[in-house]
Image (cartoon, helix red, strand yellow):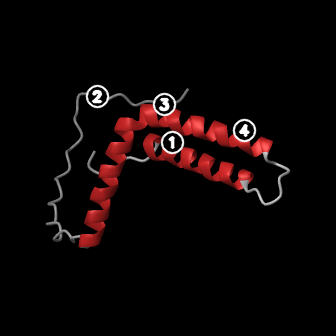
């Protein structure tokens, strides 16, 4: 049988000399509008996360009511209950993604 693992003997392998690090170029400052947008989004995220346990219930109940209205008004001409339900459901899904998956930089 062949040796699969070669265990170290009494000799140490010669250590490589570390490569000197090059100085990093000056950091490029992002535009002022991007900084303000990131800070605003971070503030909104923190606010939504803090009220999320209550907000989740309120929006979920609203989506349920819209679903009941959609079923009740399905055959009514000129009623856009299906699209209204989809819009409310999209808001609930977007908020769930925003709170659960998105994480602002620096937090």
Q: Label 1, on which residue?
A: 96
- In the rendering, which numbered label is found on residue 4? 3
Q: Nearer the viewer, mark 4 or mark 1?
A: 4
Q: Label 2, on which residue?
A: 9
Determine contact: label 3, label 4, CB under 8 Å. no
Residue at x 59%, y 39% (from the top left corner): 62
Task: Find the distance from the CA under tag 2 to the CA under tag 4.
Answer: 75 Å
Between 2 and 65, which is closer to the camera in this rendering?
A: 65
First in sequence, mark 2 or 3: give its number: 3
Between 33 and 15, which is closer to the camera in this rendering?
A: 33
Q: Which of marks 3 and 1 is in front?
A: 1
Q: How crowded is mark 3: few (under 14 residues within 10 Å), some or many (20 or more)?
A: few
Helix, strand or loop for disc 3:
loop
Q: Quadrant of residue 63?
A: top right
First in sequence, mark 4 or 1: give its number: 4
One can see residue 92 in this view: yes
Vertical side of 7 occupied by 24: above or below: below
Task: Find the distance from the CA under tag 1 to the CA under tag 2.
Answer: 57 Å
- In the rendering, which numbered label is found on residue 68? 4
First in sequence, mark 1 or 2: give its number: 2
Q: Give residue 7's position: percent from left, percent from top.
A: 35, 28
Q: Give residue 88's position: percent from left, percent from top.
A: 60, 48
First in sequence, mark 3 or 1: give its number: 3
Vertical side of 67 occupied by 23: above or below: below
């Amino acid at each position: 049988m062949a040796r699969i693992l070669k265990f170290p003997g009494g000799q140490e392998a010669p250590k490589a000399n570390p490569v000197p690090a090059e100085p990093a170029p000056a950091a490029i400052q992002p535009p002022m509008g991007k900084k303000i947008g990131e800070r605003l989004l971070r503030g909104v995220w923190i606010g939504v996360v803090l009220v999320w346990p209550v907000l989740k219930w309120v929006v979920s109940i609203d989506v349920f009511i819209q679903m009941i209205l959609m079923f009740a008004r399905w055959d009514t001409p000129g009623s856009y209950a299906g699209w209204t339900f989809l819009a409310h459901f999209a808001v609930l899904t977007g908020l769930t993604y925003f709170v659960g998956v998105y994480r602002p930089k620096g937090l």
